[in-house]
Image (spheres, coloured by chain):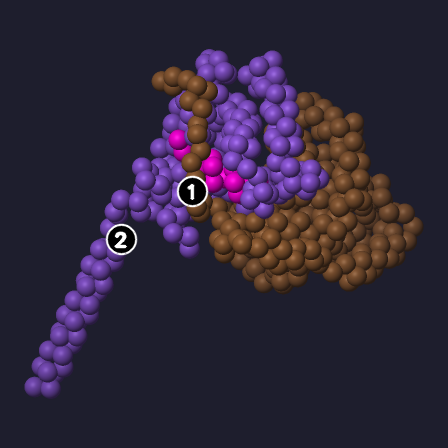
């Protein structure tokens, strides 16, 4: 989560972060949503249903910075191939599952203040209560968060971040961004990332006691843990992809939309899907005799 | 005297209430009665589909080539491939002529088979539960919400958009944790098509290339 913080940590880390944050906000202010550039009715003689199918807002990629974004995406992918993925795979190979689960529980427990603050900002008091209960149970019974006992008692983990909080206020994503190391993001979520650093008490503890190295190790561990749990998933995602950048962009934007709705996002309408049926000859030889 | 009247009135009111209540229930009963092609059937269709997929595709002792055939048959029978194919090509569909469209649909089917047929080997002990079925604005379409729990991992919420056809149902889209397969593929293919100046032939070539790499991977034992 907070690799960026780690990278800029040093003397006056907070001040530098504030500057970076300010810069992001300024970018956010300037970057208005791009016009899709589609002149309405540019190709005429299309029925209403067809026009829906062909010119839909789901086709808006919201990505005017595509060229630098693609460059950073390639950079991240290279980093992943040579460093992050091997590290994650080695970690998964060497460390037994219960230990890895404990580490994840511990890291999640440390994140409590940020999650709680965002639960509250969103007015999600029931979820805030879950977060608090989890913290109380896991810190005590679960031995400083090493064991997620709360999960078994009906208090499942959920994550929150300030990007989601902004989203829940109805603030749009701004333009799509690929951040170095962090990967897919947006102006809104990038700002959220910065705000979460301020919401985290450990930020102040670290800068007070000169614990920058320790502070850096946490996001690193979080990153490796997350990656080690997604090795196959990412491989599967990539395997049939013909433009992985575009695929990830779409995945990111859809899944953020769902996260903002706390997993209850209504399915997006799919314009024109399944109207005007037409014939399609299937080649039966490929199916063969099945059972 | 007065208390008598009051009691009678209360009894009458109670009776009236009961009648109203039963009437309402009766009406609900009529409305809720399943008839052919209702949400209940959409759920049953999906239950059946997942049962068959698990029965036919998870057995690794069957050669991958045969499992691919089975998957293809199941995929064709249960997914509306032409509608999905046209949707994922999006705005470029209209400028593409018939033979290229057919070629695209074939290439699209192939890559889906290569991609998903080997996937089911991990799903043997997967728990599948239908949570809700609801009709949507589009006529004859339903969203079936399900929870899928592969062994040892967290439950995933998957929504299936299905539509009623003459002889049952077909799947139009699969939405996992808010991510729609149709929208994702459409976004990806749109990026490719934009770079190719809208030539669907180029998209087909890329899909074919990817399919063959994939196919090699599957037969050399990667997932087999």
Host chain of mark 2: B
Which percent across, then down, holds residue A246? Answer: 67, 40
The colour of chain B is purple
Q: Quarter of the image holding residue B31?
A: bottom left
Farthest bottom residue in view: B2
Q: Which chain is brown?
A: A
Range shown magenta: B77-90
Q: Nearer the viewer, mark 2 or mark 1?
A: 1
Q: Kindly identify the residue that appears in the image at 55 percent across and 24 percent down.
A: B114
Which percent across, then down, holds residue B81? Answer: 47, 35
Q: Kindly identify the residue that appears in the image at 24 percent across and 50 percent down.
A: B33
Report the disc number at residue B32. 2
Q: Secondary structure at mark 2?
A: helix
Kindly report the secondary structure that dominates the magenta region of the rendered protein. helix
Q: Residues within 10 Å of mark 2 (few under 14, many from 20)?
A: few
Check the image and report above or below for A84 versus A110.
above
Report the disc number at residue A277. 1
Q: Secondary structure at mark 1?
A: loop
Q: Residues within 10 Å of mark 1 (few under 14, many from 20)?
A: few
- Image quarter (top left, top right, bottom left or bottom right) of the N terminus of chain A: top right
- Image quarter (top left, top right, bottom left or bottom right) of the C terminus of chain A: top left
Q: Front-most of A228 and A278? A: A278
Q: Kindly identify the residue that appears in the image at 42 percent across and 36 percent down.
A: A279
């Amino acid at each position: 989560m907070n690799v960026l913080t780690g990278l800029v940590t040093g003397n006056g880390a907070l001040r530098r972060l504030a500057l970076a944050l300010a810069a992001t906000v300024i970018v956010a202010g300037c970057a208005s949503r791009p016009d899709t550039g589609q002149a309405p009715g540019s190709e005429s003689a299309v029925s209403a249903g067809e026009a829906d199918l062909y010119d839909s807002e789901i086709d808006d990629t919201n990505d005017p910075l595509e060229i630098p974004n693609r460059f950073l995406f390639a950079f991240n992918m290279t980093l992943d191939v040579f460093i992050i993925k091997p590290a994650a795979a080695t970690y998964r190979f060497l460390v037994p599952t219960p230990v890895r689960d404990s580490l994840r529980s511990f890291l999640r427990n440390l994140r409590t203040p940020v999650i709680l603050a965002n639960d509250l900002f969103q007015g999600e008091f029931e979820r805030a209560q879950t977060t608090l209960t989890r913290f109380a149970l896991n810190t005590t019974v679960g031995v400083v968060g090493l064991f997620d006992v709360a999960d078994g008692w009906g208090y499942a983990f959920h994550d929150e971040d300030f990007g989601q909080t902004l989203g829940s206020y109805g603030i749009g994503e701004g333009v799509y961004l690929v951040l170095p190391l962090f990967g897919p993001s947006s102006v809104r979520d990038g700002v959220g990332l910065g705000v979460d650093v301020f919401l985290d008490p450990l930020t102040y503890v670290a800068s007070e006691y000169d614990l920058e190295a320790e502070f850096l190790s946490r996001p690193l561990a979080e990153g490796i843990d997350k990656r080690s749990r997604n090795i196959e998933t990412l491989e599967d995602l990539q395997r049939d992809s013909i433009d992985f950048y575009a695929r990830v962009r779409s995945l990111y934007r859809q899944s953020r939309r769902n996260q903002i709705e706390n997993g209850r996002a209504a399915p997006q309408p799919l314009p024109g899907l399944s109207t005007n049926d037409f014939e399609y000859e299937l080649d039966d030889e490929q199916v063969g005799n099945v059972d | 005297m007065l208390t008598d009247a009051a009691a009678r009135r209360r009894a009458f009111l109670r009776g009236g209430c009961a009648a109203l209540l039963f009437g309402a229930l009766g009406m609900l009963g009529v409305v809720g009665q399943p008839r052919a092609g209702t949400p209940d059937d959409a759920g049953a269709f999906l239950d059946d589909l997942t049962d068959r997929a698990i029965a036919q595709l998870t057995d690794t002792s069957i050669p991958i080539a045969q499992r691919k055939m089975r998957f293809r048959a199941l995929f064709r029978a249960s997914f509306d491939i032409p509608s999905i194919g046209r949707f994922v090509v999006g705005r470029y569909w209209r400028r593409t002529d018939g033979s290229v469209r057919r070629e695209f649909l074939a290439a699209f089917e192939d890559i889906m088979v290569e991609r998903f047929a080997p996937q089911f080997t991990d799903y043997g002990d997967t728990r599948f539960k239908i949570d809700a079925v609801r009709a949507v604005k589009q006529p004859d379409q339903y969203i079936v919400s399900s929870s899928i729990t592969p062994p040892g991992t967290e439950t995933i919420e998957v929504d299936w958009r299905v539509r009623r056809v003459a002889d049952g149902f077909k799947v139009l889209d699969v939405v996992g944790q808010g991510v729609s397969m149709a929208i994702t593929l459409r976004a990806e293919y749109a990026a490719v098509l934009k770079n190719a100046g809208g030539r669907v032939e180029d998209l087909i070539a890329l899909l074919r290339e990817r399919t063959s790499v994939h196919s090699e991977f599957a037969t050399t034992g990667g997932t087999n």
